[in-house]
Amino acid sequence: MSSTLKYNSKEAEQKWYSYWEKHNFFHSEVDEREPYSIVIPPPNVTGVLHMGHMLNITIQDVLVRRARLLGKNACWVPGTDHASIATEAKVVAKLKADGISKADLSREDFLKHAWEWTDDYGGRILNQLKKLGASCDWERTKFTLDDNMYESVVQSFIDLHNKGLVYRGYRMVNWDPEAKTTLSDEEVIYEEKQGKLYFVSYQLVDSEEKLTIATTRPETIFGDSAICVNPNDTRFSHLKGKKAIVPIVGRHIPIIEDDYVDIEFGTGCLKVTPAHDENDKVLGEKHNLEVYDIFNEDATLNSFGLDYEGQDRFVARTNFVKALEKQGSLLKTENYTNKVGTSERTKAVIEPRLSDQWFLKMKDLAKPAITAVLESDEIHLHPKKFENTYRHWMENIRDWNISRQLWWGHQIPAYYFGDGENDYVVAKTKEDALHLAKEKSGKSLSLSDLTQDSDVLDTWFSSWLWPISVFDGIRNPENKEFQYYYPTNDLVTGPDILFFWVARMIMAGYEYTGQKPFENVYLTGLVRDKQRKKMSKSLGNSPDALKLIENYSADGVRVGLLLSNAAGNDLLFDEALCQQGKGFSNKIWNAFKLITSWEVSETIEQPESSKIAIQWYEAVFQDKLRELEDHYSKYRISNALMTSYKLVWDDFCSWFLEIIKPGYEQPVDQKTLESAIALFEDNLKILHPFMPFITEEIWHQITKREPSEALTVSLWPEQRKYNSSIISEFAFTAEVISGIRTIRKEKNIAFKNEIDFLIINNESASKAFDSVITKMGNLQNLTYVDSAIEGSLTFRVKSNEYFIPVEGAIDIEAEIAKLKEELLYYKGFLISVDKKLANERFVNNAPEQVVNLEKQKKADALAQIQTITASLESL
């Protein structure tokens, strides 16, 4: 057994990760063991490691490494997501920088550029996860656009379409004008924004009368089809059947009646723009109104915008408002705060837009997913508080818009053979589609008559299959891996995608397998800075994840992240926590160095103090082992770390090692050393999930081991019966030792000086630890007596009384001089406080709390004077 002088984290991290990979410790194959499977929330293929990833991955790695130590067949499947919107935006930006427009490329040429980009940047994040110590089964790495994953997604779409759950509809959708695609409702973030409310007058046809409407989006006036009033509003009953003139535009539009309009709200008149508002669309269909779609896909105005054609909607708004003002149609403007929908990905303001899209019916799919989480308790959310959010989302679920107007992604397997609403078929290949199209149309068609839908599927439509598709459970549900690893055990993710991903995976699980996809969902908090702001690169408050590892070690960062994080609670990140994690690594390393520095003797007897200390630490370790089990079972990962941290730092390092440590230049007995190493190895096992690198390093430095004996594939400590009373006995003993140390410090009794110690054992406390008290207090004699000893320094623990005779223990003359000096100080301090309190001006004019503070100072000074005087009298 040997140790180098200093622990080199960078060297250890590189060495041991390579070692683990070389010996294939992370790879899992089907066998007779109990499986433990977990799938990584796939990060964007072109993403880089950030604080949220680090927290998420650390928690997963803790769970996986512990599962291995428990003897389970642990399988952690890594992978990346093609991220349609984000990746396509990056590729388009790169092409633009190179002077190439997407519009000038064919789909095939664009996809070549997208694959080049992915090949260049893709997978970097997975390599970065290795730096953190992630023990994924890298042989199983998946990408959502892999051929087999692609086939699974296409097969899923076809299956759902054939069941009547996927349908095509002309609907009002959320349009992202920057990404130029539709978004699902869940991808729209509503933010309160300060805007304007514009009051605009509309001239009636063949009348001097005018109506006033109020709008926050005056540019949509170009798309007006009607003005609507409530039929019960007597102010406007005379206008039935009349028409109004759209200002600037000049279009004549009908005045319609509908009780949808709130008489009390605004002016009582509502402009109806069916192409640009969900509720207006409903009114438009009900009253058979014209539809004027005024926007291009990038939210510039089209030809309906007249002179403003080609202008961005917000530029057009400013210019159009000036024109309304000039015409006299703008009556007034007011400041107005309303909720504006923005794209989760691009942050662009969303435009409602009518469009042909593909939708998935969700209501029936949601039912078993609601039951599993909220009724049957098949799936557990940690913490449980998120069940309310889950219930709200699931019980108010709307059909899912699954098509996206992009090229990067899974192209929708729908083929059109005519211009009719239903002139399409859904099939795996163009050849299959041709066969179906001939049947459906009754016509003799050829492949050239078919056109595949140019849209791709929403990225989430592939990732909702993730726990199934990574084990090929869609294409080949009878395969042995799927049968063995599915359902998976745990999922670790953020609450922000509880609906986007978690709920949808649950729905897919029951739809395709009749089973839950996982048993437990651990929802992490968001990582925030000390000012509680969410960490993000755009705000500039997110540290470089890899730099943190370089500065504080992977183990230090892992510990730092978990020290302040509990499930579902936001993590207030501070680099000082990583420093604390690094400090803990140093503590463990120094403990190892201390043990290995002792010379060993095979002849000397084991001291009683070491014997009882070993019995105590074995008991306290077993006690903490059960506490750890409870924390892990309830997914209190941070609590599990804190239990391990305190056990090693306080119980092992601060107490156990100090008790068994041999005297200066004295050897340790063989029995004690062997026990200390065995207990230290148990410590390393429970620390390994949190701190894999330093624990593996020490494990191999303790003794030369074969690869099969590596710590990462060793066995979790076994639970054994233990003596719980010895733990409480030691807690009492620790108080006694603290009392001795306090007196030594207060009275300047050097620790190298042996002293006498007398005990009145009113508590009938166990004497098992007397040898420990003698050693840790450096006592000459420990004697039990029946009555108090005059002229002694004394303290109590519960009702037990402890005495240290003054004679021989302290330098009485030096102590008297010190006490007199202190007495002089407090008397002088008391005079100055009394003087201040005797000053009526001060007492009457100073704030009450200031006066009270002075009174408290006086009381404290009097107490000190009394204590010092009593001490002097006793000497």
Image (tube, helix red, strand yellow):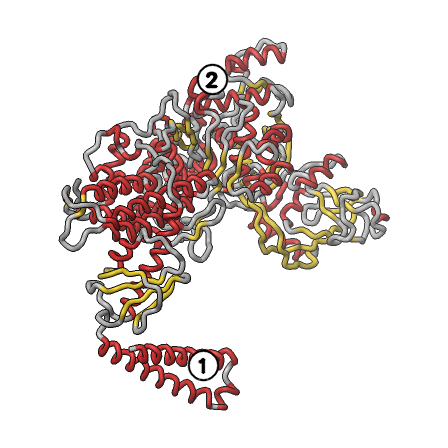
Quarter location, residue 441: top right
Q: Give x and y (percent) for residue 665.
A: 13, 53
Classify mark 2: helix, strand or loop.
Answer: loop
Q: Residue furthest front?
A: 786
Vertical position of residue 453 compared to residue 800: above or below: above
Mark closer to the chain start, 1 or 2 = 2
Of 391 and 593, which appears nearest the observer?
Answer: 593
**Residue depicted at 62% across the width and 44% down the height:** 306
Q: Give x and y (percent) for residue 629.
A: 42, 39
Of 73 and 462, which appears nearest the observer?
Answer: 73
Quarter location, residue 323: bottom right
Quarter of the image with the C terminus is bottom left
Q: Which mark is residue 141?
A: none
Q: Which residue is mark 2?
A: 476
Of 416 and 871, which appears nearest the observer?
Answer: 871
Q: Which residue is mark 1?
A: 854
Residue 311 seen from this side:
no
Q: Amino acid at mark 1?
A: Glu
Vertical position of residue 845 compared to residue 390: above or below: below
Of 475 and 687, which appears nearest the observer?
Answer: 687
Q: CA distance from mark 1 to mark 2?
A: 81 Å
Quarter of the image with the N terminus is top left
**Residue depicted at 26% across the width and 39% down the height:** 678
